[in-house]
Image (cartoon, rainbow, N blue to C red):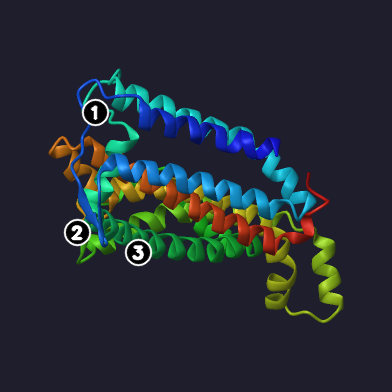
């Protein structure tokens, strides 16, 4: 029960501040349609706070059935308290008393208003970013793993590929933008190319390191059992290198997400980076922050998916790596 109270207390404080603390410059009550109802930014912000509190309660109820989950819930309760208190402080500084420079730092209710006012545009640009990221990241990861395996397993491949890797890897992917726009027929393909380059270097480097660190005795054991070289790669080298491969993938996620936003700002017809640029041009900073919130959620979901895949494929590490 202590973990539940701790988790919900911050959100309750944020909700009470939103309801009872008045605005120094008056409350913005502009309402926008959301399905069959009409809501203001303040209304949506209150609903989100209540919804998140209910989610914490449901999560607490589920965690009571499992001792491990109960312990994890208790451990994360301090973070949830900090989140609620941070929202309360942000509401006071950004909305209620406007202690932060306006309109550059709007409060959470102002950001919620952006989703009501411009929700369809945010959704369309989010889908564009997801599509661009998926193409660039998946292609870059696949090419990086293949290249890393070749470098790590075959000395001749390393002889020819390593110079290219050393030259291209140290250069920021953005410097290739002028050439990419000339080489590829569309700006979307050019941006995919930049993401591929960005992902390729860390995935290739760490995949090769993992392959090269595979003990020779494991290859010899597989060879004695009649495994061909190709089978040795898939049953010995790659499984042994998986921890390093995932380290490269996780490292590449952050780099590629940064380059995704930069590529969208530099010439894409859509995407969250494009939306931020357009909103900034109109001084609609509450929309800029709305796009940043979406980016944070999007990146968190991508990282969560990668962690789940890593935990599934490397489940043998449980109890070994602490």
Return the residue found at the far front. Answer: 20
The answer to whether residue 172 shows anywhere in this view is no
Mark 2 lies on residue:
182
Secondary element at image label 2: helix
Q: Earlier in the sequence, mark 3 or mark 2?
A: 3
Where residue 296 sits in the image (x, y, percent)? 42, 45
Q: Nearer the viewer, mark 3 or mark 1?
A: 1
Where residue 202 sits in the image (x, y, percent)? 52, 50
Q: What's the mark number on residue 131?
A: 3
What residue is drawn where x is 50% and y is 66%? 142
What residue is drawn where x is 23% and y is 58%? 120
Q: CA distance from mark 3 to mark 2?
A: 22 Å
Return the residue found at the far left. Answer: 282
Q: Earlier in the sequence, mark 1 or mark 2?
A: 1
Q: Nearer the viewer, mark 3 or mark 2?
A: 3
How busy is the neighbourhood of tag 3: few (under 14 within 10 Å), some, or many (20 plus)? some
Circles 3 and 2, Cβ within 8 Å, touching? The answer is: no
The answer to whether residue 109 shows anywhere in this view is yes
Secondary element at image label 1: loop
Q: Quadrant of the N terminus?
A: top right
In this rendered view, identify the residue nearer to me: 239 or 298. 298
Secondary element at image label 3: helix
Mark 1 lies on residue:
104
In this rendered view, identify the residue nearer to me: 168 or 259. 259
């Amino acid at each position: 029960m202590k973990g539940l109270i701790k988790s919900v207390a911050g959100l309750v404080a944020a909700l009470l501040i939103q309801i009872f603390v008045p605005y120094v410059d008056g409350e913005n009550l502009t309402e926008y349609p959301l399905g069959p109802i009409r809501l203001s930014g303040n209304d949506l912000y209150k609903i989100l706070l209540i919804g998140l509190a209910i989610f914490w309660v449901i999560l607490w109820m589920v965690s009571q059935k499992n001792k491990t989950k109960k312990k994890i819930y208790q451990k994360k309760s301090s973070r949830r308290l900090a989140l609620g208190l941070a929202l309360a402080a942000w509401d006071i500084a950004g909305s209620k008393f406007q202690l932060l420079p306006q309109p550059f730092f709007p409060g959470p209710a102002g950001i919620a208003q952006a989703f009501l006012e411009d929700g369809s545009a945010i959704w369309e640009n989010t889908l564009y970013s997801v599509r661009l990221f998926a193409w660039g990241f998946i292609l870059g990861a696949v090419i990086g793993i293949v290249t890393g395996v070749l470098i790590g397993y075959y000395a001749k491949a390393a002889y020819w590929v390593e110079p290219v890797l050393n030259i291209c890897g140290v250069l920021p992917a953005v410097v290739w933008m002028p050439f990419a726009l000339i080489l590829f027929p569309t700006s979307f393909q050019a941006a995919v190319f930049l993401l591929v380059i960005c992902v390729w270097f860390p995935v290739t480097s760490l995949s090769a390191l993992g392959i090269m660190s595979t003990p020779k005795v494991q290859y010899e054991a597989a060879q004695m059992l009649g495994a061909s070289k190709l089978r040795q790669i898939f049953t010995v080298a790659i499984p042994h290198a998986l921890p390093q491969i995932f380290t490269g993938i996780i490292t590449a996620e952050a780099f590629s997400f940064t380059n995704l936003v930069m590529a969208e700002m530099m010439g894409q017809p859509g995407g969250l980076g494009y939306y931020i640029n357009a909103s900034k041009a109109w001084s609609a900073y509450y929309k800029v922050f709305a796009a940043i919130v979406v980016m944070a959620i999007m990146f968190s979901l991508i990282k969560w998916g990668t962690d789940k895949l890593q935990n599934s494929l490397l489940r043998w590490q449980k109890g070994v790596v602490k």
